[in-house]
Every structure is written in C-alpha cells, then in structure tokens.
Amino acid sequence: MNPTTAYKNSEISIYSNKIKTKVAKFVKSRTTFKKKAKKIRTKVTFHRPKTLKKDGNPKYPRISAPPRNKLDHYQILKYPLTTESAMKKIEDNNTMVFIVDIRTDKKKIKDAVKKMYDIQIKKVNTLIRPDGTKKAYVRLTPDYDALDVANKIGII
C-alpha cells in the first residue's frame, strides 16, 4: 500500500466522520418525536378543553315563523280595580291597583303602566289571588298624584 494513498484514505474517513456527525445532529434536531414537557395538573377533576365553536349558518329556518310577543302592554294590564280598598290605596298611599296577566313580572308591569299612562312608578308589588289572577299594586312617584291619574283613566 502506498503511503500517500493511505494518508488520503484516512483523511477522507476523518472528513466523512465529521460530516456524519453533523448530519446526525441535524437529523436529531429535526425529528418529530421530541419529549414534551408534562403539564402540571392543579385540579383533581378533568374538564374537556374548550374547542372552536362556529356560528350556525342554516340552509333553512328550523321554525316556519318567528315567535311573536304574546304579551304587549295591552295584554299585560287587564283592568284597574275599583273596589273600596283599591280606592283607599289611591287616596292614602298614592298607589293604583291593577289586575295583570299571570305571566308578567314586575319590570314588565312597570314598563306597561309607564307606556300606557305616561307616569313614573316608584315600585310594584304583586300577589296572586285565590281565584288565580295576579294583582299588582303600582306605587307612583310623589310628583304624580294617583287621584289625577285615576280620573284620567276613568276609574273615579
């Protein structure tokens, strides 16, 4: 074996070893199997993570017509009470008494009275009578007089 060729072969083998190590490092850094850091659990129970929720875009409406509002302000207030005790409330407490729809709440009653009679309401108390109807005591603010409003409505 010629000494010059032996020297060249060893030089090539050293050079190829360096390339091999560089390639190995490169491949190792690009591999998809990396050790993932474990997430620390802070709670005992597992909850499914929140995922993307898209808005619905239906091809046709699921109901044929949109539901209409069954309770407008004319249906909320059925009629004012004109009993002696209701008249006493009007005179003494600046409070008007109405029979209202059973499904309404105090806020809807307040809005309906405000819309129909153009008056400001301080508060509304309700009760359900033994006959199944709902009675609403509507207290007016001090700048409105319940007697004047009752006259305007036609109770008195």
Image (cartoon, rainbow, N blue to C red):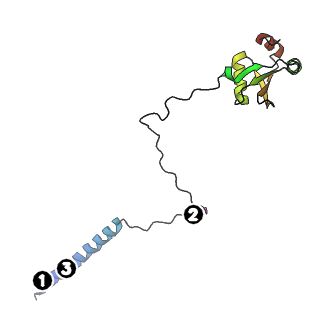
- Quadrant of the frame with the C terminus: top right
Give residue 5's mark: 1
Dot 2 falls on a residue whose secondary structure is: loop
Left or right of 111? Residue 140 is right
Dot 1 falls on a residue whose secondary structure is: helix
| Mark 1 to mark 3 CA distance (whole Å) | 10 Å
- Kind of residue indicated by mark 1: Thr
| Mark 1 to mark 2 CA distance (whole Å) | 63 Å
The first of marks 2 and 3 along the sequence is 3
Up the image or down, 66 lies above or below 34; here it is above
Q: Which residues are magenta?
A: 34-52
Q: To which quarter of the image does residue 4 belong?
A: bottom left
- Kind of residue indicated by mark 3: Glu
What percent of the width, then of the height, locates residue 20? 26, 74
Inspect the magenta stretch and tell me whether residue 39 lies in it.
yes
- Quadrant of the frame with the N terminus: bottom left
Q: Which residue is denoted by mark 3 in the rendering?
A: 11
The first of marks 1 and 3 along the sequence is 1
